[in-house]
Image (cartoon, coloured by chain):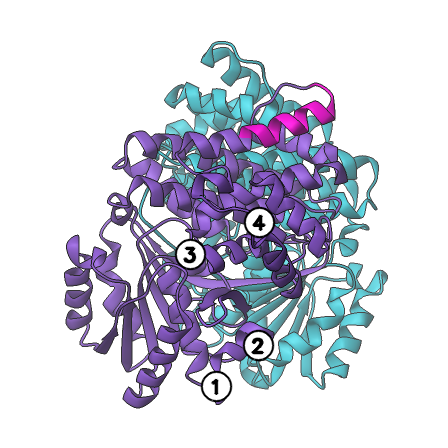
Chain colours: A cyan, B purple
Amino acid sequence: MENFEYQCGTKIIFGKETENEAGEEIRKLGKKVLLHYGSRSIKKNGLYDRILASLKNANVDFIELSGVVPNPRLSLVREGIELCKKENVDCILAVGGGSVIDSAKAIAAGVPYDGDVWDFFEGKRIDKSLPVGVVLTISAAGSEASMATVITNEDGPRKASSHGDIRPKFAVLNPELTYSVPKDQTANGIADMMAHIFERYFTNSGSVDLTDKLCEGALRSIIKNARIVMESPEDYGARANLMWASTLAHNGILGTGREEDWASHGIEHQLSAFYDIPHGAGLAIIFPAWMRYVVGQDMSRFAQFGREVWEIEECCDEDMAIRAIEKTKEFFGEIGLPTSLSELDIGGEKFSEMAKICAASGRRGSFVRLKPEDIEKIYELAK
Amino acid sequence: MENFEYQCGTKIIFGKETENEAGEEIRKLGKKVLLHYGSRSIKKNGLYDRILASLKNANVDFIELSGVVPNPRLSLVREGIELCKKENVDCILAVGGGSVIDSAKAIAAGVPYDGDVWDFFEGKRIDKSLPVGVVLTISAAGSEASMATVITNEDGPRKASSHGDIRPKFAVLNPELTYSVPKDQTANGIADMMAHIFERYFTNSGSVDLTDKLCEGALRSIIKNARIVMESPEDYGARANLMWASTLAHNGILGTGREEDWASHGIEHQLSAFYDIPHGAGLAIIFPAWMRYVVGQDMSRFAQFGREVWEIEECCDEDMAIRAIEKTKEFFGEIGLPTSLSELDIGGEKFSEMAKICAASGRRGSFVRLKPEDIEKIYELAK
């Protein structure tokens, strides 16, 4: 087990009707709030009205900025920073999924910073930011309790992540809010949370038995409940288990004491930057390809993955490992995700360019350290 | 899944030589520190000298209070409170195991309080306390990241717990410090951490699949690594997995969304109050007896416990459940723990009195709500 430091102070407020507590919670964080969200969906289902009522009941002074899109854009972040500075906003309430939260975090980092916010996505660490609170509407990115934000610079195109002191102060998680998430987005979210665990699970760190078991248990629970929500989108228990799993998959606890990988995220980020595909769908395509490419690094870990997560019967490690990767791909297909780039009409024209950008971003993995030509081969395997 | 709130902001500093960071960390919490510990053991192994060097290197002003014993005493807590008030202490560094940390937490709660600290153990909630930091020396109680403290009032005798805003601000966890923990104390600690998971695992809450899997995974890891450290007390990996498991077993994460039980802890507390036996040993005796008494409440949960934790082959629920309880008891025996009260020369004379006090304390369980006569029968089963 590696030495580590771990601290996650995000207050989780979980359960039915908890969105009504958002006003009281955000009031503790500041005097003037930026209410940040995407677009129509929170207005359609009544959530917007309930949040406004909660803010008004708590006597919270707020302004609004909407318009966040999937793969959230730098231009809106810059607009948010200007708005917050002009209006003396001192905290942000993000109502939405990972894109809205990531956009809110980037704004929060940019407000107290004199330079350009993109600096944080080119290596500068965030060490000061406005406090952020969250009302989560989709189980996926885990951004509600993570230290990371991912933003797309549409001038590049380039999608990059930043890390630091931007963990939300609180996150309101009401599984009922996810009932209306469409099947494809639900599936994207499932791939995203599983990928967050994969990035931590496939490691060269030894003696990590406890977190192995926690990762495997979380994956088994996700797989089981994913199958339930695909049939019954309003099953509260299944939505609740998935929602809590999505947070735990990315709040850092499952990676404690482990060297983590993150190459697949880097490889996927270029895909969604170049082709604007959903992050989860990209991960569902890339991860099985990455697994096939690196399986030789540690057959016994992949065999363990097969035994403990996919309940593959004991045989030789190599067969179990190969079967586990097949099962992973089959599962993504089963819940309606794409399992190859060709399904999204993405050809090989930009593989070389994307591989170079990915390698240059530093996201080259640690389970196996990838060169640009390795990354290109993984894109090839994903065809 | 039940609605819940969860927040654990304890900063974990985990790994080799991390005790040298204690001075820098505690300096962030206050100007004058109470260094609180037990007795000889931290002086024998050089830890005391390293802590002192760390405090001096960080220019920390501190005073000392030693003398904490297992089942920590109210009298020393009162002495600590007086000392802190007199010396204007504004934070506490606890160096030791659960007893030292619990003693430090009680002192921390008592200093800013005008009344008698025992009020907190008779129902008053702690909502203000001095900040506490921890250097942990034994994997067991999980007090290093929990909201609870358990103190023995030697005038009773009575052992009682209190809860509230007393989670340590940081906990330094160096598994090497546990190499010298004797076999019996190591085993007590293993029973204690497993018991913390049992209290959360046996629940009537439905749709708690994710936390079920996390509990089962943590238990399997504890069992595996317990067997290793019993043979090889200086196996770093096994000590590390157990140490992190002991913290996660009791920081609340494994109980999220679940109604918890805690009857067995109440039943055990009377045993260690009356007979001053180690808490872990008491739990190893009481838990299998409690399981036998309540198994009819939910055979399928006990069968699942057998299948997922003890790898018992699928058959009828009742047989799997009974076998799982036997396995639990056998395991405690295997690692050298007592498995009956008679092994500790404890007869039935006080069963009735202890059962009444336990029931009056409110620790009567929720998986099955116990009456005094039920508790007495559990003591009988533990004979």
In whole angstroms, how far apart are the C-alphas of marks 1 and 4? 32 Å
Q: Secondary structure at mark 2?
A: strand
- Which of discs 1 and 4 lies nearer the camera? The answer is 1
- Which residue is label 4 attached to? B254
- Which residue is label 3 attached to? B276
- Which residue is label 2 attached to? A91
Q: Earlier in the sequence, mark 1 or mark 4?
A: 1
In whole angstroms, how far apart are the C-alphas of marks 1 and 3? 29 Å
In this view of the protein, which residue sits in the foreground, B318 or A371?
Answer: B318
What subunit carries mark 3?
B
Q: Secondary structure at mark 4?
A: helix
Quadrant of the frame with the C terminus of chain A: top right
State the image coordinates of residue A43 (x, y, percent, origin top left).
Answer: 82, 65
User: Around disc 2, counting alpha carbons within 10 Å, would you say few (fewer than 14), some (14 to 19), or many (20 or more)?
Assistant: many
User: Which region shows up in magenta?
Assistant: B315-327
Residue depicted at x 59% and y 19%: A326
Q: Which picture quadrant has residue B281? A: top left
Q: Are marks 3 and 4 on the same chain?
A: yes
Tell me, yes or no, if residue A218 can be seen here. Answer: no
Where is B176 relative to B51, above or below? Answer: above
Type of amino acid under label 4: Leu
User: Around disc 3, counting alpha carbons within 10 Å, would you say few (fewer than 14), some (14 to 19), or many (20 or more)?
Assistant: some
- Which of discs 4 and 2 lies nearer the camera? The answer is 4
Q: Are marks 2 and 3 on the same chain?
A: no
User: Around disc 1, counting alpha carbons within 10 Å, would you say few (fewer than 14), some (14 to 19), or many (20 or more)?
Assistant: some
State the image coordinates of residue B42 (x, y, percent, origin top left).
Answer: 21, 58
- Which of discs 1 and 3 lies nearer the camera? The answer is 3
Where is A100 relative to A34, above or below? Answer: above
In whole angstroms, how far apart are the C-alphas of marks 1 and 2? 33 Å
In this view of the protein, which residue sits in the foreground, A153 or B315?
Answer: B315
Type of amino acid under label 2: Cys
The main secondary structure of the magenta stretch is helix
